[in-house]
Image (tube, rainbow, N blue to C red):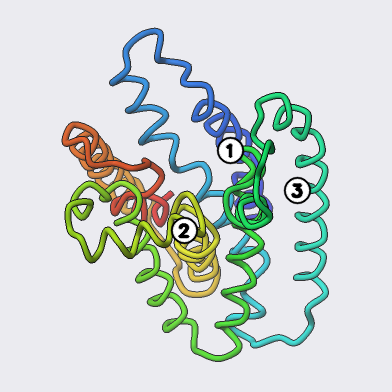
Amino acid sequence: MEDNKQFGGLDYFKVIAALLVVAIHTAPLSIVNDTIDFLFTGILARIAVPFFLMTTGYFLLPPYLFEKSCDYRSLWRFIKKTLLLYGIAVIIYLPINIYAGQLQGISFFAFLRMLIFDGTFYHLWYLPASILGVLLLVFAGRKFPFKVVFIVSLIFYGFGLIGDSYYGFISNDSILDTIYQFMFQVFSYTRNGIFYAPVFLAMGVGIRGKYKFRHVADITCGFIISVSLMIFEGLTLNYLGVQRHNSMYIALLPTMFFL
């Protein structure tokens, strides 16, 4: 009964998270005030995508990262299902791609970049990112203990941060900027299956296997503090004008942990 209630809570929040994803791409509060809209869609709504990734990690990956399971049937089902969904979405949005001229004169490499990293339409990036992130974690989990996998995913998230919300701090550094400019030739954003998805997938795995909370007050307090820090971080970075994108924040990690 307790497990059913817990999983039911996840199902309920999926609806909220889905609405937050819609809000991110429609800027519903921009008619009121740009700052208020950024606070909602550029900061608070950023919990939606990590939630879906953590849910995937929670249910799919523990056997591969803790038990080193060689039964890949559930993994292949996830990949086939996600690829099918992605393929359908690509076909649905193809007329819009053509109408917008996004495929006109595009090179094979550029199309491959869209397909693997960016998504053939802006919001479709999540589907290939989730597949790539899952494959990276499963592969790493065969070679290393979970703690090492998690630490490496944190390091990769740090690299992603610099190319996302913190990019303005290194854009004048010729060496780092050159490295990131080269990376942006391979993918348009660091919120992808390499730098973004793995850490949240790993967090879902870790919560399933390692962390057991006993007091709701502790969770609530941790969440409120983390969200407050994320709001402060996001508004400060936006005010400084250093964000190349606004998907990745330092405080997003503890926020998702307590969420």
**Mark found first going from the N terminus, 1 or 3:** 3
Judge left or right: residue 145 versus residue 90.
Answer: left
- Residue type at tag 2: Tyr
Where is residue 75 shown, x and y percent of the image? 75, 70
Q: Name the residue beneath numbered marker 3.
A: 86
Judge left or right: residue 251 versus residue 14.
Answer: left
Q: Which residue is at 78% across, 55% downward?
A: 83
- Residue type at tag 1: Tyr
Direction front: furthest residue: 105
- Residue type at tag 3: Tyr
Q: Are marks 3 and 2 in contact (CB under 8 Å)?
A: no
- Residue 91 falls in image quadrant: top right
**Mark found first going from the N terminus, 1 or 2:** 1
Q: Which residue is at 48% across, 16% downward?
A: 28
Helix, strand or loop status at disc 3? helix
Q: Name the residue beneath numbered marker 1.
A: 122
Task: Tell me if residue 57 comes above or below residue 29 in the rendering.
Answer: below
Q: Name the residue beneath numbered marker 2.
A: 196
Q: Nearer the viewer, residue 59 or 48?
A: 48
- Marks 3/2: CA distance? 19 Å
Where is residue 105 shown, x and y percent of the image? 67, 41
Q: Which residue is at 31% across, 19% downward?
A: 36
**Mark found first going from the N terminus, 3 or 2:** 3
